[in-house]
Amino acid sequence: MIKMKFEEVKEMSSKYLFQNYGRIDLSFTHGKGCYLYDTEGREYLDLVAGIAVNSIGYAHPDWVKAMQDQVAKLCHVSNLYYVEEQAKLAEKVASITPGDLDRTLFVNSGAEANEGALKLAVRYTGRSKVLSALNSFHGRTAASLGATGQTKYQASFEPLISDAYQYYEYGNIESVKEMVSKDTAALIVEPIQGEGGVRMASKEFFKAVRDICTDNGVLMIVDEVQTGIGRMGTWYGIQNYDVIPDVITMAKALGGGAPIGAVTTTDDIAKVMTPGTHGTTFGGNPLVTASGCATLDIMKKENLVQNSHDLGARWIADLKGIKSDKIKEVRGCGLIIGVEMDSNETAAAVQKHCRDNGVLVNVCHGNTVRLIPPLIINDAQKDVFTKLLKECI
C-alpha cells in the first residue's frame, strides 16, 4: 500500500466520512510501547492510549504474536457454535473478578456491554426504572445514552431515549435514597466519572449504594468500561471501595486494542438470559477473545496493575505538589488522573503545549486535562508531562 501524506488522509476523510468527530490534525502510521509516530515521522509520547484502551502499549510482541497466530487460524465463526478462545477468556475474566461474578457475556463495545447489563437487570427484576448519575457517561446507543446523565450527549436524540431513567447526584447518598422505589430495576454507577471530569465519590457512598440496592432488590451495575482492567490500580475500580456489585461491565483495555466488551455477573442473575433473549454476531469471536487472553496474560506477567497503583500514586503526588493558581484540583486513582485547570482556555493551552512538544493528552469536561496512559508507562515518561505542565502554566 502506498504511504499517504497527512493532507491526503485529511482530504479523503473530509470527502468520504461522516463529519461527526472534531479531529486533531494528526494521523499516525504506527506505534511502539508508549509512543506513536505520525505520517511525517514525528514521535509522540501517548498519554491517551486510545481513550484508555491500549493499556499494554503499542505493538507488544506477545500480543502481536497471539494476533498473528489467531488470524492464521480463525477470526470469526459466530455464536452458533462453541468458541474455544471465548471460553478461555471467560475463565480468565472470572479469575480476576471479585465475589461470585464469574459468568460473562462478550459483546463488541462498552456501550453494548451497558445495553446488555440494562436488559439483564430489567428481565431479572421485572421492574421498569433505572437510576443513573448526573454527569455520567455510559455510551451512545439508545439505552446507554439514556443512562448517560449529560444532556449535551442526549440533545436531538430524545425520541430514542426511554423515560425509564432517573438521575441522582453522584456521591450524594440522600439523592439515591429519594429516588429508589419498588419500580427500580438497577442503579448504574462509575467508580470514577471519566468523561465527567475524572470525579470520584467516597467509599462511604459506594458502600451505602450497595446496601440500598441489596435492601430494595435493585441490581447494582458498575460501569468499568474506562476504569476496569487495571486502570485504577486494581483489576476493577470498584475494588478500591471494598464493594462487590451485582453486575460489572467492561470493554476498552480488555482487548488490548481489539474491539471487545463484556458483561459479568453471577450464575443466578445470568440464568434469566435464555437462548433468544440477547445476542450479537461478532461478540466474543475467536480473534477478539484471543486478544483478550493475550492482554490479561501480559498484564499478569508484567505486573501492570501494581505499576498502575504505584506509579499513579507518585504521579498524583507530584502534580498536587505544583503550586499554581492555574490548577484548581488534581483528582484520580491509579493511572486515571484529572488535572482541573482554571478555565477551558488554560486546559486547551496545556494540551497544545504538550502536543507541540511531542506529548498527547486529552481534555474532558471542558477544563480537565485527563491522563490515561498505557499501564506500561515509567517514571521518566510521566515526568515529561509534569515538566511540560509546569512550563505551560
Image (spheres, rainbow, N blue to C red):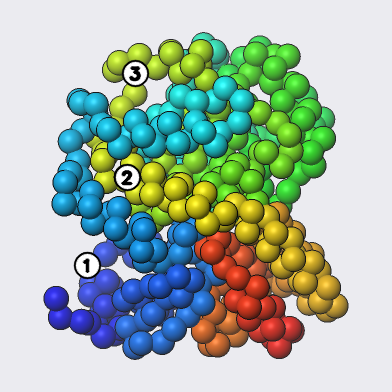
Q: Establish if 210 lies above or below 109.
A: above
Horizontal side of 192 relative to 356 (left or right) equals right
> Residue at the location (60% across, 76% down)?
381
Establish if 44 lies above or below 253: below
C-beta proximity under 8 Å, tags 2 and 3: no
* Mark 3: secondary structure: loop
Characterize the local packing of mark 1: few (<14), some (14-19) or many (20 or more) Cα atoms within 10 angstroms: few
First in sequence, mark 3 or 1: give its number.
1
- Residue drawn 32% across the image and 45% down it: 290
Give the label on residue 31, or none.
none
Q: CA distance from mark 3 to mark 1?
A: 37 Å
The amino acid type found where label 2 is placed reads: Ala
Count of number-bearing discs? 3
Quarter of the rendering occupied by the N terminus: bottom left
Residue 281 placement (x, y as % from top left): 24, 34
Q: Whole-Å distance between the Cαs marked 2 and 3?
A: 26 Å
What SS does tag 1 mark? Answer: helix
Q: Which residue is disc 1 drawn over?
A: 16
In this figure, which residue is indicated by the disc labeled 2?
A: 290
Q: Are marks 3 and 1 in contact (CB under 8 Å)?
A: no
**How far apart, in angstroms, are the residues tagged by discs 1 and 2?**
32 Å
Q: Where is 238 relative to 82, above or below?
A: below
Which of discs 3 and 1 lies nearer the camera? The answer is 3
Amino acid type of disc 3?
Answer: Thr
Name the amino acid type tagged 1. Tyr
- Give the mark nearer the N terminus: 2 vs 3: 3
Q: Toward which corner of the image does residue 8 lie, by quadrant?
A: bottom left
Give the numbered dot on residue 277.
3
Rendered residue at 46%/47% (across/down): 296
